[in-house]
Image (cartoon, helix red, strand yellow):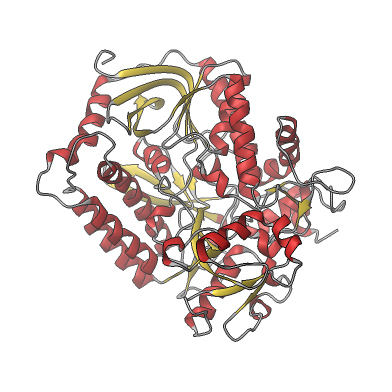
Amino acid sequence: MSDRFETHEHDVLVIGAGGAGLRAAIEALAQGVSVGVVSKSLLGKAHTVMAEGGIAAAMCNVDSADGWKPHFRDTMRGGKMLNNWRMAQLHAQEAPERVRELEHWGAVFDRTADGNILQRAFGGHTYKRLCHVGDRTGLEMIRTLQDRGVQLGFDVYMECTIVRLLTDGEKCVGAIGYWREQGRFVVFKAKSVVMATGGIGKAWPITSNSWEYTGDGMALAYEAGAELMDLEFVQFHPTGMVWPPGVQGILVTEAVRGEGGILRNKLGERFMEKYDPKRMELSTRDVVARSIYTEVKEGRGTEHGGAYLDISHKPAEYVKKKLPSMYHQFKELADVDITKGPMEVGPTCHYVMGGIRVEAETAQSTLPGLFAAGEAAAGLHGANRLGGNSLSDLLVFGRRAGSAAAKHAKEVSAPNIDPAQTDSAEKYALAPFQRSDGESPYAIHRDLQTTMQSLVGIYRTREDVQKALLELGKLNERWTHTSVEGSRMFNPGWHLALDLKSMLTISEAVARSALVREESRGAHSRIDFPELSADWGTKNNIIRREDSGMTLRQDVKPALPADLQQVLDEDKG
């Protein structure tokens, strides 16, 4: 095998170079093991950059009444109690320390008058707890982590797509991928693998996610035998751009509302008064997204089918200082000056709460040797994620995954790579070139997006989801006939054909989970089951691959310990 394929060997292989992957790599390096980081695109072009509003951490710099307990409580309530409570506890307790670490490594934050890190309000958070850098927080985080990792010395493999995880018996021992530029295959041998590949947004047409977000990591883990969890919970961010068409779905940060932005319909009504009079624009994302959707559906939407978000009542200098990226984004892309008039916004597929099932302490999946962190992992956010919790999530659990992966690597013997697996992966990846008269992957991708948007979107019904599953079956069948032309040299059609398989697998998992969960909870809204169900409040949907295909079962969540139950029962103060 070794002479057929370019091969690299590491103690820990990190797949994905966003915040979670970089934080895991830094932690593993600190434990003295050799680390390789594989990135599907370029280093620094991660989705973490899209997280603009801030990092949720109870630093208590602005609200001294805050602390890990209120943060834990907000996270659990936002997630409609479906969260892995141990993850929510660790996250709330460890986030402040992770932010201080970031600052220590050179991250520059906005400051309070007395020089502490400034914190802003955000939807679903009781106190001002989002540490931020204007509305470019994710960019600053990636810059800092990248510099730190390069300084510590990890090996980076850019523009490399992983096709399969390699297993030896019941454990994960590496991966095989290909260089996107020339299409040559490359094998990575590793004692531990950390999956940090983000979400699944490209299965929907209107999304804040860019081309990399095709669910690869979840599909790779699933194919290798790891369990997935809670995939019915797909978050539609309430505010994405809706006009012009070329920028549809691009994120409009929640920081606009955190800094005082107001939502109105075309009649000028501040409609959040109807849906959540107490929290208004700072309600949780699932509520705001459904409210905008409802206004549009009932004929009160804006010209291009959205709602107006207005911050122009604030002084122009304030807006430019607090929201520099948003100011430029609307000026350049939509020719709108947000200091003078409203933005037009609508829901956009943004984040998935579900993903690879992991243990809270170690971030290890159900497949030994495979760890997961960030958006690719499930558990922390329950049925709905609060804004700002993703950045602290990837710091807290990126670190835990890197630490546990390094420890695991020190305890196991050198991996054994089975040539039959690498040969079969190569054959699978090259199959589209062998078919001369098949179908274009672009047509199948378009039909997949249409199916998911219209049948498994913000609102769902049994009939729609059943129809979606039938459609997905047909699309899977069509996928077996995809064909691509040209050579393997930077061939976007070929890349899409392989990404499409991941999207089809995860879309099926989303639809199957959405069909059985007969209730509305967090980001999962069933028109035919509009209420919360006590029975479903204790169950997670678990997806697993068996010889017969995709299987689904429910696992009952462990009960909350008495001391944490007490934290939840206390209200503010």
Looking at this view, is 348 or 147 the one in front?
147
Does residue 152 appear to the left or right of 58 in the view shown?
left
Is residue 382 shown to the viewer in this render? yes
Image quadrant for the N terminus? top left
Q: Is residue 531 above or below residue 474?
A: below
Instruction: Give residue 89's quadrant in the image.
Output: top right
**Residue at image x 69%, y 72%?**
280
Q: Is residue 379 above or below residue 396?
A: below
Image quadrant for the C terminus? bottom right
Measuring from the top left, give residue 400's x and y in whole percent: 61, 32
Is residue 80 shown to the viewer in this render? no
**Extreme-right residue of the structure:** 114
Q: Is residue 548 above or below residue 242?
A: above
Instruction: Give residue 145's quadrant in the image.
Output: top right
Measuring from the top left, give residue 471's x and y in whole percent: 26, 62
Measuring from the top left, give residue 28's x and y in whole percent: 58, 23
Looking at this view, is 287 or 308 the one in front?
308
Does residue 437 appear to the left or right of 130 in the view shown?
left
**Extreme-left residue of the structure:** 437
Measuring from the top left, give residue 301's x and y in whole percent: 52, 80
Picture mark count: 0
Does residue 19 appear to the left or right of 71 in the view shown?
left
**Residue at image x 64%, y 64%?**
284
